[in-house]
Amino acid sequence: MTDQKFTELLSEKLSGEISAGDDQDFIAMLAANEDYRREYESLCTYFQQQDRPYENADIIFQQIKNRINIVGAEPKPIFSSNKLSRSFSQWYRIAAIFIFGLCTFFAYQFFKAKNVADSGMEIAWKKQYTRSRQTSVLTLADGSKVTLNAESEIKYPVSFTGTNREVYLDGEAFFDVAKDHQHPFIVHTRNISIKVLGTAFNVKSYKDEQATETTLLRGKVEITLNKRPEKHILLNPAEKFTLIHALDSTAEKLNGEIYRITPLTYYKDDKDAILETSWMNNKLLFRNESFSLLSMRLSRWYGVNFIFKSGKLKDDKFTGEFEKESLTEALKALQSITPFEYKIQGKTIYIYPANSYR
């Protein structure tokens, strides 16, 4: 048992994998046994003298096997030391050590070559952008289906390689992810990353909006905040995650929290009309939504820009739905809820307080 323990520690020592505790035991064994010490010094001398110690590894290993198999034969030194004579058991230990070192070396070379090859392999990426007033659908290499909302862009690989399936989103998209428990699917946005195995969820991350949202319909997702990577948030079906990343009064209303989890929002208590995903059905549903936030959705819906001439109008709330209405019809419908004036110049809509526009 002592010889076996010494062989194990010697192997770990030569490969540089020995722990601090085992290293102390190894040193103690060397101090108590002169044969052990000579054997270790001989191996160290050999490997230090060789510029390429594994260049003739197959020849050396064959010599070691021959010495083990020739019972009673006088062993001839393989390593450059005329002072040492080794017994059969010593050569057995050396053979075991050498085999271990040889395997370690070739394994290292294999993975090193593989990593170099992988690092030199450029991933082929594709991008798809959806203009305003449009949506688009694409199927990824793994079979996952992505529906892209207006003014949104997704970056994805032509084929998925490696441990994870990763894509990058700027805007809004609905993901129906193909199940693959060995390769998690990760959506990267400007402020969060969403990790899933197989599920259906909506991600909204426009750079001009004050919040990033993830709405989960089925399955489970794990959300990581880019600025707080140690924070992982699990989302369950029928829940919506909202991250507030604007430094204004909106964040203060969350009692110091930078995110919140709320149930899905339904339009007029209709379980089939989910506000967060209504855009996939070519409907624009909104419930108690501020004019400021609604104007951003209208901008993408109609391909226009809104400019408010009164900050107070931005806080007015609206509830309603648009589907086939023209821009003028939509504005007139909003005027019936909250009085205001508007002026259209090209693709810019100017919003004025009621009775103030001339």
Image: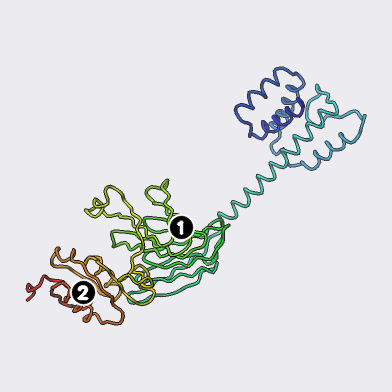
Tell me the distance, in whole angstroms, between the alpha carbons under discs 1 and 2. Answer: 39 Å
222 w.r.t. 148: above or below: above
Looking at the image, which is closer to me, 327 or 54? Answer: 327
Amino acid on which the number 1 mark rests in the picture:
Val
Looking at the image, which is closer to me, 7 or 107? Answer: 7
Element under disc 2: strand
The quarter holding residue 241 reads bottom left
Q: Tell me the residue at 67%/30% (across/down).
A: 13
What label does residue 348 carry, if any?
Answer: 2
Of the image marks 1 and 2, the number of the one nearer the N terminus: 1
Residues packed near mark 1 inside 10 Å, few (<14), some (14 to 19) or many (20 plus): many
248 w.r.t. 300: above or below: above
Residue 209: x and y, percent? 29, 62
What label does residue 221 carry, if any?
Answer: 1
Q: Is residue 85 left or right of residue 34?
A: right
The quarter holding residue 11 reads top right
Q: Are marks 1 and 2 in contact (CB under 8 Å)?
A: no
Q: Is residue 99 left or right of residue 283?
A: right
User: In which quadrant will I find the N terminus?
Assistant: top right
Q: Is residue 290 left or right of residue 205?
A: left
Residue 177: x and y, percent? 50, 65
Element under disc 1: strand
